[in-house]
Amino acid sequence: MSSINVIVFLPLLAAIVAGLGNKKLGLIPSKVITTGALFFSCALSWPIFLSFLGGHAEASVTPVLHWVKSGDLDFLWALRVDTLTAIMLVVITTVSFLVHLYSWGYMSEEPDQPRFFAYLSLFTFAMLMLVTADNLVQMFFGWEGVGLASYLLIGFWFRKPSANAAAMKAFVVNRVGDLGFMMGIFATFLVFHTVSIPQILHDAPAVLSGSTIGFLGYRLDTATVICILLFIGAMGKSAQLGLHTWLPDAMEGPTPVSALIHAATMVTAGVFMVCRLSPLFELSPTATSFVTFIGAMTCFFAATIGTTQTDIKRVIAYSTCSQLGYMFFAAGVGAYGAAMFHLFTHAFFKALLFLGAGSVIHAMHHEQDMRYYGGLRKKIPLTFFAMMAGTLAITGVGAFEIGFAGFFSKDAIIEAAWAKGTELGHFAFFMGVFAALLTSFYSWRLVYLTFFGKPRWEQSEHIQHAVHDAHGHDDHGHDHAHAHGHDHHHHDEHSDGTAGYHPHESPLVMLVPLVVLSLGAIFAGWVFAHAFISEGTGEFWKGALVYSEHLIHAAHHVPTWVKWSPFAVMVTGFLIATYAYVVNPAFPAAFVNQFGFLYRFLLNKWYFDELYHFIFVRPALWLGRVFWKVGDIGIIDRFGPNGAAWLVAQGSRGAVKLQSGYLYSYALVMLVGLVGAISWVIAQ
Amino acid sequence: MTGFPILSLMLLVPLVGAGLVLKANREQARLIALIATLIDFVLGVVLWMHFDVGGAQWQFQERAALFSGFEWKLGIDGIALLLIALTVFLMPICIGASWNSIEKRAGEYYAAFLLMETLMIGVFTAQDLFLFYIMFEAGLIPMYLIIGIWGGADRIYASYKFFLYTLLGSVLMLIAMFWMVNVAGTSDIPTLMAYNFPVHAQTWLWLAFFASFAVKMPMWPVHTWLPDAHVQAPTAGSVILAGVLLKMGGYGFIRFSLPMFPEASAQFAPLVWGLSMAAVVITSLIALVQQDIKKLIAYSSVAHMAIVTIGLFAFNTQGLEGSMLIMLSHGLVAGALFLGVGVIYDRLHTREITRYGGLAINMPYYALFMLLFTMASIGLPGTSGFVGEFLSLMGVYAESSWVALVCTTGIILGAAYMLYLYRRVIFGDQKNADAAAMLDLDKREWAMMVPLAAVVLWMGVYPESFLAPMRKDIAALEARVAPAKPKGDAQLKLGVAQPVGAAAHEEAAHGEAH
């Protein structure tokens, strides 16, 4: 049994044991089993990655079980390992292990912990199945499996109506994307007579060049149809413009979940898919243009919304959405290596930001609104340093080949977009640069609102609750509340804005993951940039994705102003944020007064939710009622069975006496009549 | 096994059981019924084990002349085998579901169930046209009684509606059968399956059979009996109705319409597609606004059965095998969902969605099983629901991308109404004290849920066990319909020569070509 089997199936086993054992198993055993399983998976994944990094590993496929054979459709459960998978393996298992560990502290007051840890491990299994898929259907299995885990984890606090709504929304919106994915698989099978990914990629150039296909009554380029359908799936899972509405709502889930699923791993599945199928996408310039456009639009649009949100997790969620946009337009312009590199670095610094935010929320008694933070720098210093590392990484601080993780990957993407040389490439470049400005702004805004300035805690209901509870009479444990500040005795001094509340630094199990991820956010770019994105890395990728030496060369020789523009906007964003939130704190309010319309437009997230509610949700319910009350009852039943009944009743008034009213006699008469009729006909 | 009349024995066991329970008291009756159905289940397992996969098309054949031209002619192929297996698997579970909930006239109740089992197995084993017809129609009678006597408050209306709908179809089918026997000179089903009826006659024959099968299936717009029947039927009645009786329509299409009238089937394929597309969208939307749990699942059944019909009328291997798998999967999953409704109905005596809520708190294992079956219902890969749905839709894509697109929206709408149901019943906070006080599954309920869950996962992870027995029969059927099969709309054009019409569409393709 090769190690990949252990890596993939150990989390599943742990999930089953912890999930079914649940409370009978006990809190500690279930946590030890799941976290231990992930530790092993993680420990086995790194050697695989390092051997690919060292260039002495070959792609392999480990068959597990036959799955479906129907006519010439035939596919297995199989585990594929190549460079692309190896990268995803370390990202998934590392972040997942750290999130498991972190949850020991973050979820410590939660009575339902076995269920939580079982879901986390189940998610990890599904994600691993996705990235090790050797055929499109297994990828779809993982795709939907992570969707299920995401649904369960967003709705983990299932008593909360908002959590339930968010969970359902995530699943259903993802299903819209899955519709595209499924149609894409159908079209692929129709064209290639196989769903095996290597086979498809091998045959694609010969089969697809110049080929056309009928689709919905139109005759279109085959590669374009297939790629765009599959990409719609990617848009759903990776929350791209139009299908992004579920991601911010998904923040209803516990924060470790947001770090694992909605930042580091699941939402990057779409990027992974495009990279995995890059030889296919390269055959359709229309599809790659579409990918570029959607990616560029998303990175810009999500960043604009991120600037106005006040919920700390939502800011990071929109930031994730925006960063995913970068990855997609990188893939769209052909810089698949840069897309994967950003996926890799982003996993570390975004998981770090989420877990850091979780630590802040933990310290602030489940308050998530940044308007009620402030001045936390000295209270929770380790969390502050971790968040700083994350912020420096996401804003891409660095110059002259030295910098934080995001500096290497984001700059590589922006340069590649310019180097592509097409108009759309330039469009993506400008969008990317502008989004980088906004990224820098909202990231520093988050830091200033949270860690700097004076405490504004007293306005928070959560904090008041905590203070009240601490001095209150009995701790009638309301759910999920962490009681802090028990040791506090002087609560009459409220003028400092603290309401007498004392935030505490998180426990060690939460700080260790923060430290590890901080190291990732600081060094991941510098250490791995050479392998992922420098010239001559074809031997690292070994054909796992399309690697264009030419594009990388061009990206390294873009004009100086192109090279420096991300740096310039990063500094500009920092300066604006510093001015608005440190130097002149009255500025944001003045801005809002001046540009109220723009502010409301951004605050309300471009009104996507309202729009969708108006054009999809309400009509669906209305149509359902009409089809039911008018269609089924008013027309079909009325003129069908009820009408017939009425006719019979009118015509059979005289026959009433014959009817005994017993169902038996009807049945018997019916059967006897039937047999009699047939006998009569045959006997003739 | 050759020569041993195992099929007759499988018909006989429940029949004898029915006779025994008729006058027995409640405790005896349910025990006898359970034993009889378990014996039949064991026989079913023996049957499957001795079925020669890839061997002769018709196996375990028996024949004996009866009065006035009737012939007792039995035999099965892989398709029938699977449906028989489904029947004998579900029957003991139905008896279990009735264990405590049936109090009045229990003897007669179990007799009706056992009789129905005989008739259902009879439908799938009959090789004589009229034997099939009698089984097919008589199978309704026990169901009619079960709804009419042991049903809910509005049972008379529901059973009446059920009866009226199915009667209409069956009369037309009977007339068509007479004509066929006259022309072909035999009532032997295997012979008829290879008989080439004149094309113009096929049209009428197809329509006559369609009238019956469409109602049974049920297809939109002749589906309105199903929600009422389900709502009024006792739990076990719903399980067997959704589990097996609906499959008779699909079986009819596979056994009669497609092989006997291939040209007419191809000719009417657009009609079937149209009705199926309408069913997927319309009944899914209706399911979205239901307040009654059983009605919601009943409407979802109509939507799922529509995917069966488009798979059948895709005329290719994936479509046909997918349809068979959906039928099996839906039998298990819809059965399990109705069983789940029965579990809480037994405790609270209401099917009103709003009366429940927060069941995950007091019934965690129940919540887990329902999650599995809900996910199977919406076709999550790894469960039985996915494989069939995926194959069916893939099959029909080769025929028409429009049909595939519209029917695939079923995965979105299906997720919406099922998760909405799950959210209101299982999730949320506890709203009513009596619902909050309900106990989790007891041993009897575990014993019913576990086998269903196991098979649902088995079929999702390793469907080969279920695909292998029917592979050869489906291939034969595909070969039979292939000559008439309509040309798909994809019309893939390979290669360098760019068609004139396409040049305008894509600069992309243009670039590639030069």
Image: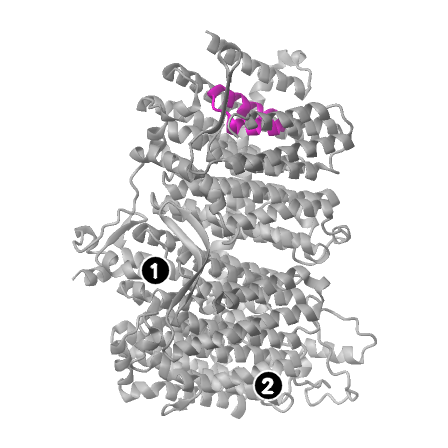
Task: Name which residue type carries label 1.
Answer: Ile
Task: Pick the residue in front: B218 or B454.
Answer: B454
Residue B127 magenta: yes
**What is the magenta segment's predominant secondary structure?**
helix
The spot of residue A570 in percent (x, y) is 41, 86
- Whole-percent x, y for residue B246 in the image: 53, 34
Residue A36 image position (x, y, % from top left): 60, 72
Disc 2 marks which residue?
A: A383
Residue under mark 1: which chain is it in?
A
Q: In which chain is the residue bearing label 2? A: A
Q: Is residue A198 visible to us here? A: yes
Label 1: which residue? A228
Question: Which badge, 1 or 2, is on the more N-terminal residue?
Answer: 1
| Residue A627 can be seen in this image | no
Queried whether the magenta region covers residue B485, the answer comes back as no
Label 2 neighbour load within 10 Å: few <14, some 14-19, many 20+: many
Single out the residue that lies furthest toward the top: A684
Looking at the picture, how far across and down is residue B489, in whole percent?
30, 44
Q: Is residue A164 above or below residue B390?
A: below
Q: Is residue B129 left or right of residue B194?
A: right
At x 39%, y 47%, the residue is B394
Residue B329 is left or right of residue A470, and the answer is: left
Crowd class of label 1 (few under 14; some 14 to 19; many from 20; radius 10 Å): many
**Amino acid type at mark 2:** Thr
Q: Which portion, as a residue range, is magenta?
A: B115-144
Q: Secondary structure at mark 2?
A: helix
Q: Are marks 1 and 2 on the same chain?
A: yes
Residue A61 or residue A495, whichever sits in front: A61
Would you identify the image quadrant in which residue A495 lies? bottom right
Q: Is residue B249 left or right of residue B494?
A: right
**Which residue is depicted at the point 73% across and 42% down?**
B346
Name the mark on residue A204: none
